[in-house]
Image: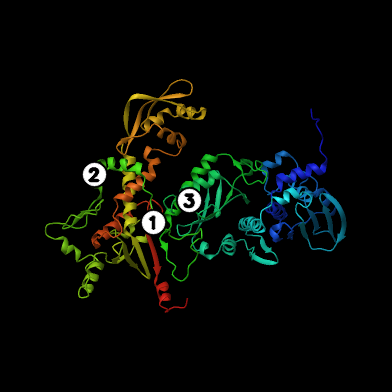
């Protein structure tokens, strides 16, 4: 039987280093956070070969007193806290006192530090956790820390480091986050003797974002500021003109600390649903201020994750606020003809094309739904333009014209069939009804200023409606616009209708997990509201006597798992059928190359203006995009680019 051994300090420090120091970026994080906690206003970060050979951090902070330099390299030695109760009022980024000891145990470290009231600086050299020398030297107020030969005494650890490029990318990503989260500090980042960037340190987050992420992102940001009883948040969220294929541009800070919170990210991403394309992620930079006693930052080795009280209330409130802010802003797309912002293989896209994948199993549902919608929905979309023309936009884009007029005459108003002799008359005809004003009679009744003073010019390719407003030309995708109108119409109709229940001849017995049976037992009335007739049947079983009848056909009993997983998020069974209803709207909307008249185009815009989200289709594709007169003049070299 093996005996229990007490490990020596060297072994303990190397084991601890394995938890704290995963890679060179971990060292940069710990040292820069120490500099931030030392009230530095200027921090320089220099690396070589992905940080494997050199990491140099220089700051102008408070420095370390000569008598405390030795203690700084001891495990669990810190100036941030004195007792466990201090964690409840913690405002610093570091607090455990493990970083310097762990770094020194697996590398060669040189520190030069000086406080403002000391005449000379102190230089200490440590190799592999052993103090080599400690001498007075010259130096400025602050701390300079040089880490070299990382993992030189643990070659197995060094062998598993990634390539220089991969380690450099990890460090760069980290410094980006630290610099944006601390705009009052001037950061300078040097890689292999080359300056990568230097922020201004003027306290402006937007300036820091501009230096690091570029003007193309800054030009599409919406500033937010909100305070609730649980938290306050400030920062920037992107509109629908810019998005990513990954989460790398989702920056969340709590009390100045960059964190990763899947729950918080998911609720923010949900706020962008149908505003950006599916499988894309938004761009945002948010700093939350929360009472330190309400959060726990001591649950992750690198302090990247936190737990906080009142999480559900915070998530619901921030989700509603961000969604509301997005809907208040103009989300019309911008066309940028002067340059190609991103390569074809870039993960950044402005207006990706969308192809909805046809689901064969859904064909049955759609077929069964057609009869149900025919009477219920089409009545709502029978538009009246004037006394002589009525029409409805449906699957076939069929038009019903009064006997006094023929469809041939209506074509004279359509962009098709133009000839040179009639173009002026047609132009006048299409401009007069709009009269250079909102599609509503009273501009005060118009919910969104983006629909004021739209002047219809024509329709091109039987797909895009052209408008002029002041010095802007606006293009509207007729399919995406009608798809949005139909989607909100269908969703409203389904939500307002009662849920029918299909009784089962043979009840279904289902065995659930301990957690799931508890949810069903606690919310038995909610399941009844969703169309299920459920009763307990033993310790961990339920008996299903009836299932909801959605889209005209009974749901599978497995639909109950969707209700269980989203019991706090949905109020109606159709809330979990977003994609199905989106496809119904897509299939039933007018298509590209469907010919519509100018009157129909005007009525379509009038209906779109009333939508909750008139900017994107249910799948997140933009409905409108604009180009300014100045940009057009640049194309023709009338203006300097």
Q: Nearer the viewer, mark 2 or mark 3?
A: 2
- Here the colouring is rainbow
Q: On residue 559, which mark appears? A: none
Q: Position of residue 512 (x, y in %)?
A: 47, 28
Residue 510 placement (x, y as % from top left): 43, 26
Seen at 58% across and 59% down, the residue is 205
Q: Dividing the picture into quarters, in which one does residue 470 lie?
A: bottom left
Q: Which residue lies furthest to the top in this view?
A: 538
* Residue neighbourhood size for the residue with mark 3, other residues' Cα within 10 Å, grouped as few (<14), some (14–19), many (≥20): many
In three-dimensional space, the C-alpha distance between marks 2 and 3, rounded to whole angstroms, equals: 36 Å
Circles 3, 1 touching at the beta carbon (< 8 Å): no
Residue located beneath label 2 in the image: 374
Residue 615's disc is 1
- The answer to which of marks 3 and 1 sits earlier in the sequence is 3
> Which residue in the protein does label 3 denote?
322
212 in relation to 72, above or below: below
């Amino acid at each position: 039987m093996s005996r229990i051994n007490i490990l020596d300090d060297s072994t303990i420090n190397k084991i601890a280093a394995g938890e704290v120091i995963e890679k060179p970026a971990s060292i940069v994080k710990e040292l820069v956070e120490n500099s931030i906690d030392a009230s530095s206003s200027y921090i320089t970060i220099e690396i070589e070969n992905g940080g494997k050979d050199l990491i140099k951090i220089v700051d102008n902070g408070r420095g370390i007193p000569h008598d405390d330099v030795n203690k700084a390299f001891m495990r669990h030695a810190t100036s941030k806290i004195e007792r466990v109760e201090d964690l409840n009022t913690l405002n610093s980024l570091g607090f455990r006192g493990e970083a310097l000891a762990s770094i020194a145990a697996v590398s060669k470290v040189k520190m030069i530090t000086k406080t403002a009231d000391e005449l000379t600086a102190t230089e200490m050299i440590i190799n592999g956790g052993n103090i080599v020398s400690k001498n007075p030297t010259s130096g400025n107020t602050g701390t300079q820390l040089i880490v070299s030969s990382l993992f030189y005494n643990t070659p197995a650890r060094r062998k598993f480091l990634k390539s220089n490029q991969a380690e450099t990318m990890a460090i760069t990503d980290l410094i980006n986050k630290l610099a944006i989260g601390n705009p009052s500090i001037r950061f300078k980042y040097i890689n292999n003797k080359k300056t990568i960037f230097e922020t201004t340190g003027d306290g402006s987050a937007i300036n820091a974002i501009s230096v690091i992420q570029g003007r193309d992102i800054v030009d599409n940001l919406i500033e937010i500021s909100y305070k609730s009883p649980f938290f306050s948040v400030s920062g920037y969220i992107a509109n629908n003109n810019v998005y990513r294929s990954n989460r790398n541009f989702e920056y969340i800070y709590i009390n100045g600390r960059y964190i990763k919170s899947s729950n918080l990210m998911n609720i923010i991403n949900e706020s962008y649903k149908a505003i950006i394309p599916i499988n894309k992620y938004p761009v945002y930079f948010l700093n939350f201020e929360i009472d330190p006693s309400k959060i726990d930052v001591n649950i992750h080795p690198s302090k990247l994750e936190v737990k906080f009280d009142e999480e559900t209330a915070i998530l619901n409130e921030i989700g509603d606020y961000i969604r509301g802010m997005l809907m208040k802003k103009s989300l019309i797309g911008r066309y940028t003809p002067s340059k190609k912002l991103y390569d074809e293989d870039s993960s950044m896209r402005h207006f990706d094309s969308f192809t909805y994948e046809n689901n064969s199993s859904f064909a049955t549902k759609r077929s069964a739904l057609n009869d149900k919608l025919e009477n219920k929905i089409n009545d709502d979309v029978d538009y009246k333009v004037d006394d002589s023309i009525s029409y409805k936009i449906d699957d076939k884009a069929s038009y019903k014209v009064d006997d006094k007029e023929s469809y041939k005459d209506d074509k004279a108003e359509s962009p098709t069939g133009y000839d040179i002799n009639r173009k002026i008359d047609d132009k006048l005809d299409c401009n007069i009804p709009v009269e250079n004003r909102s599609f509503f009679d009273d501009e005060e009744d118009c919910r969104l200023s983006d629909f004021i003073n739209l002047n219809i010019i024509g329709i091109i390719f039987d797909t895009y409606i052209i408008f002029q407003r002041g010095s802007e030309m606006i293009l509207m995708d007729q399919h995406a616009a009608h798809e949005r109108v139909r989607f909100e119409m269908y969703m409203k109709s389904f939500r307002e209708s009662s849920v029918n229940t299909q009784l089962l001849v043979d009840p279904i017995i289902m065995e659930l997990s301990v957690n799931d049976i508890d949810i069903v037992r606690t919310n038995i009335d909610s399941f009844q509201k969703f169309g299920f007739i459920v009763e307990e049947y033993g310790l961990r079983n339920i008996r299903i006597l009836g299932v909801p009848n959605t889209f005209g056909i009974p749901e599978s009993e497995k639909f109950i798992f969707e209700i269980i997983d989203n019991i706090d998020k949905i109020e109606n069974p159709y809330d979990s059928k977003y994609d199905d209803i989106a496809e119904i709207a897509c299939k039933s909307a007018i298509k590209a190359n469907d010919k519509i008249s100018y009157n129909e185009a005007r009525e379509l815009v009038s209906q779109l203006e009333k939508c909750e989200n008139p900017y994107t289709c249910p799948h997140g594709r933009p409905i409108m995009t604009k180009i300014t007169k100045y940009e057009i003049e640049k194309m023709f070299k009338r203006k300097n680019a």
